[in-house]
Image (cartoon, rainbow, N blue to C red):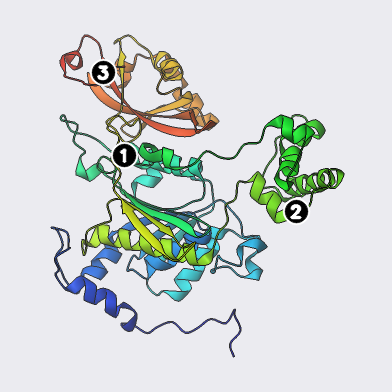
Amino acid sequence: MATPDAEQPAPTEPARWRDLDMLLSRPGNLVAASFDPSPTLRDQLGSIVEVLVVGAGGLGCELLKDLALSGFKKLHVIDMDTIDVSNLNRQFLFRVQDVGKSKAEVAAKRVMERVSGVNIEPHFCRIEDKEIEFYSQFHIIVLGLDSIEARSYINSVACGFLEYDSNDNPLEETVKPMVDGGTEGFKGHARVIIPGTTPCFECNIWLFPPQVKFPLCTLAETPRTAAHCIEYAHLIKWDEIHPGKPFDADDAEHMQWIYSEALKRAELFGISGVTYSLTQGVVKNIIPAIASTNAIISAACALEAFKLFSGCSKNVSNYLTYNGLEGTHIKVTEFVRDKDCLVCGPGTLIELDTSSTLAEFIKMLEEHPKLRISKASVTHEGNNLYMQSPEVLEQMTRPNLSVPMFELLKEAPYTTVHATGMAENNGKKVSSLRKLRVAFKGTEASKMDISESS
């Protein structure tokens, strides 16, 4: 009998692609208007479409495998995490000897070993570490994340490429579709986001329940659960013992300290249930993951990505939910896009005097009631007008702060700029990208029929 780690032989070519090629070779009643059945369509899909997978955890591993087996050959994967022993029960691309290594690098290597012809480029870094232009090369972005903040950031980046014509209709060549998957226990979702057409992540952010927060008085005086003890060590004790030292949830020593303090607290109040894995879950807000749910949601996401670019069938419209807690329940709900969305809409209108400088514009972004962007970096048509970091770019672009925006924007009466900075999202300050429509008073733009006011 083969051991669990034994690698099984890969299917031979072309048997692996038989069903896929059959699907792409036949017409049907549910195909997209642009679908042109052809036995060579799979090869065209693999040679042209570039896909970015964000996240290489439980869902990300499944996505890489499913996308590679769906004919996509140009894949990238980005993830900042390293492999932990606790990942091995469901993140099937990893082995014991991989513990401590980059998830993105190991996952890419394993899939390329099993699927011939596919090329996966790993990126072991934070999503914010990449320049915005990095994301412009991809035809589609597939999300396998467990963080609202990370989803929100990628959503703002993808929607930032979207441009509108004079009638506020999205320009097709600027649309960067996304497929977002998420799981929690026996539940999951898969949705298709086509910026400017379907709701983006921010349009429906209310779908995500608020995170559980414990009153500090309960943590400090009357803890009743293991989670209370952990949060006491995390939110109160750490600052008492380590004043001025920021807590790093990805630092194993920091996490071990929290676990030890939580145990002491639990023993003091006669509370059981504090474990290291629970400590990680509470501090990092880790949601339970089940391998079968990941596999089902990943398959749905990969299928939607495949349909988007092959046209072999119509896409789901636009939010699929799965519940396997009691039997199997799958439902599709069509949500409506928020036309006034700050992220996927035409952009927030900012009216400026022709004499307003870049420094004054950045100050306006901090005070704008809809934006509240602090420490903003500003770009226009791919050019850096001002960058807060790194230091070398800040020094290079600092002289622009005293230059009128009208001059920096080449005296265009009406144009679009992008601002990246810190903005409040779900009660937290997170990195955000916003698209802004800039109109100058007293120019042709003042005569335009612009529906949104500043």
The residue labelled by disc 3 is: 439
Q: Amino acid at mark 2?
A: Gly
Distance from disc 2 to disc 3, alpha carbons, whole Å, reads 59 Å
Q: Position of residue 218 (x, y in %)?
A: 73, 34
Residue 169: x and y, percent?
18, 36
Q: What residue do we see at 25% from left, 69% from top?
A: 42
Judged from the image, the secondary structure of the residue bearing numbered disc 2 is loop
Question: Image check: 453 left or right of 113?
Answer: left
Question: Which type of secondary structure does the marked residue at label 1 adopt?
Answer: loop
The first of marks 2 and 1 along the sequence is: 1
Callout 3 amino acid: Ala
Q: Say which of 111 and 143 sits in front.
A: 143
Rendering quarter of residue 304: bottom left
Query: Which element carries disc 3, helix, strand or loop?
Result: strand
Q: Can residue 358 be seen?
A: yes
| Pair 2/3: label in front | 2
Ranked by sequence position, the earlier of labels 3 and 1 is 1
Pick the residue in front: 267 or 5. Answer: 267
- Within 10 Å of disc 2 (Cα), the crowding (few <14, some 14-19, many 20+) is few
Q: Marks 3/1: CA distance?
A: 19 Å
Residue designated by label 2: 273
Q: Position of residue 388 (x, y in %)?
A: 50, 27
For the C terminus, give its image quadrant.
top left
User: Residue 372: x, y in percent?
Assistant: 45, 22
Q: Please name the residue that numbered disc 1 is placed on.
A: 161
If the image is split into quadrants, where does the N terminus sit?
A: bottom right
Q: In the image, 8: left or right of 382?
A: right
Most distant residue in the bottom direction = 1
Q: Identify the amino acid type marked 1.
A: Phe
